[in-house]
Amino acid sequence: MESPVRILAFSGSSRLGSLNGKFLAVAAGEARRAGCEVTVVDLGSLALPLYNGDLEEASGVPAGAARLAALVSGHHGLLIASPEYNAMPTPLLKNALDWCSRVEPNPFEGRAAAVIAASPGALGGARSMALAQQLLTKLGCLVVPGQCILPGASKAFDAEGRLLNDHALRSVGALVGRLVHVSAHLAQ
């Protein structure tokens, strides 16, 4: 029997009630419905110091970064929610990716990745999503094409965290479907 595609999911926000966390939960649910094993990681729990080359030289890669890099290496694809702070990915997301990039061998090489973004604003996090996609490509991921954003996210979920907008649900389902497809091919 063929083993299922493994997807690692994380959000660049560790805020309680995060809109991107809710959107990621929806996307992770879509991946599970597609038959994937999904591991969700809270980046805030990794206790990563701000990346500093002197710190790395003195102490090596922090345990949280080594753990995240091992998780990346142990999964076929990455599903990432990229919140937007001042039109950029969050420091939490960028710092986690920076630390992981210091681990040898490169854990990102040969992984599929999909990026989603949610925002209360009209652009839905599109700017941070595009920058996160660019960074993941630079790190060696094959980023699946597609823009999956959620504008007006503060009004997009019901009390149980279900997405209310059918168009947005179809959009996240389509992107996750592409991620699963590409991840399965890369895993062969």
Image (cartoon, rainbow, N blue to C red):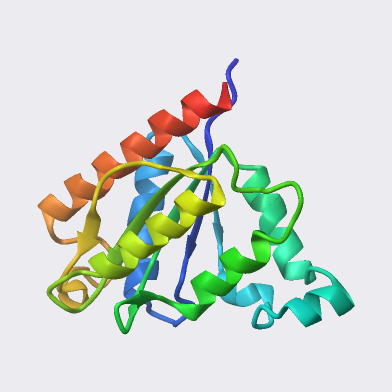
Q: In which quarter of the image is residue 154?
A: bottom left
Residue drawn 62% across and 50% down?
72
Q: Where is residue 65 in the image (x, y as percent from the top left)?
A: 71, 66
Q: Which residue lies furthest to the top in this view?
A: 1
Q: Is residue 116 above or below residue 73?
A: below
Residue 125, picture quadrant: bottom left
Q: Seen in the image, is 124 located left or right of residue 129?
A: left
How many numbered discs sit on the rendered protein?
A: 0
Q: Answer left or right for 114 relative to 95.
A: left
Q: Where is residue 150 in the image (x, y as percent from the top left)?
A: 21, 64
The quarter of the image holding the C terminus is top right
Looking at the image, the residue that sits furthest to the right is 58
Q: Which of 30 and 185 is in front in this view?
A: 185
69 on left or right of 134: right
| Quarter-of-image position of residue 44 | bottom right
Indicate the quadrant containing the N terminus: top left, top right, bottom left or bottom right.
top right
Residue located 54% across and 46% down the image: 140
User: Is 115 situated above or below 12?
Assistant: above
Q: Relative to 14, does residue 97 appear above or below in the rendering?
A: above
The one of 172 and 186 positioned closer to us in this rendering: 186
Residue 139 at what x, y percent from top left? 55, 52
Q: Which of 174 and 39 is in front in this view?
A: 174
Residue at 24 percent of width and 74 percent of height: 119
- Residue 162 appears at what percent x and percent y? 25, 61
Q: Which residue is drawn at 63% across and 75% down?
A: 45
